[in-house]
Amino acid sequence: MVYESKFIHLGFIVQNKDVLKFAKKKAIQNFKFNAQEMVRWTGLLSRRERGTRQDIIISFQEFKAMKELEKNPQLIPKEDGWSTYSAKEFLMSKGLITNYYERNFEEEWMASTHSIKVDDQPFANMISYYVMGDMHKVTELKIRLDVTNSKNKTSAIQKMLICSSKLCQKAIEQDLPKTVFDAIKNVRNISLGVQNKSLQINKEDWLNHRNKAYTITFTIKVKL
């Protein structure tokens, strides 16, 4: 059933009939009956060039390289960023579990969590975590808090502080700077440098939202 549905999906994303036939044949050869890998490959293919047979061949090569990196993650110098497969687990203990680290668009790769409820109230505030970079390393980490229920903003901000503190400990091996702590607590923008990293808090109001909702993000990014 998975193969059948994914072959239907391929029919939508690969327009050339000859290339489509070739892609299906190569998928069966490469994945046999491994449905999970078939699902991941079609997802990768949908986000890259796929108009020629050569594009299809390259997609399988990229998929194979990606799987090899998952088995044997590279050691990344601290000044360059973080390992793709350690960074995605930085906040696992806080309930923020990402999906696979994969190509997003063009040369950008990322992994992210679903938006997680901070509380059990209607229109709950939500938190999520993102890691971004290239195929080999992560260069940007981001926590996003969407505050849509101002009545419960205190618990939402507390969750943001807990996750941000943990991320600092994992990413730069330091406690959350007091200036960043205060910026999160008071919901205001700030930017500072630590080591060769940029730490930023950014607040963005939602336009025309009846509850005056806003998003606050905490980003740790390698300085270029």
Image (spheres, rainbow, N blue to C red):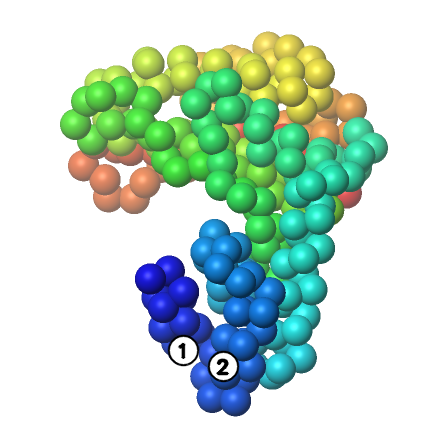
Above or below, comparing residue 19 to residue 115 in the picture: below
Q: Secondary structure at mark 2?
A: helix
Which quadrant would the N terminus be assigned to in this image?
bottom left
- Pointer 1 residue: 11
Above or below, comparing residue 181 to residue 200 in the picture: above
Circle 1: residue type? Gly
The structure residue drawn at horizontal position 58% and vertical position 73%, both measured from the top left corner, is 26
Circle 2: residue type? Leu
The answer to which of marks 2 and 1 sits earlier in the sequence is 1
Query: Residue 172: x, y in percent?
Result: 71, 21
Q: Secondary structure at mark 1?
A: helix
Which quadrant would the C terminus be assigned to in this image?
top right
Residue contact at pointers 2 and 1, CB within 8 angstroms? yes
Tell me the crowding category of disc 2: few under 14, some 14 to 19, or many 20 or more residues within 10 angstroms, Cα based: many
Query: Residue 109: x, y in percent?
Result: 61, 51
Depth check: 11 or 82 in front?
11
Residue 182 shown left or right of residue 151 in the figure: right
* Residue 137 found in image quarter: top right
Can residue 155 be seen from the camera position used here? yes
Residue at the extreme front of the image, as rendered? 32
The structure residue drawn at horizontal position 53% and vertical position 24%, both measured from the top left corner, is 91
Depth check: 37 or 138 in front?
37
- Pointer 2 residue: 20
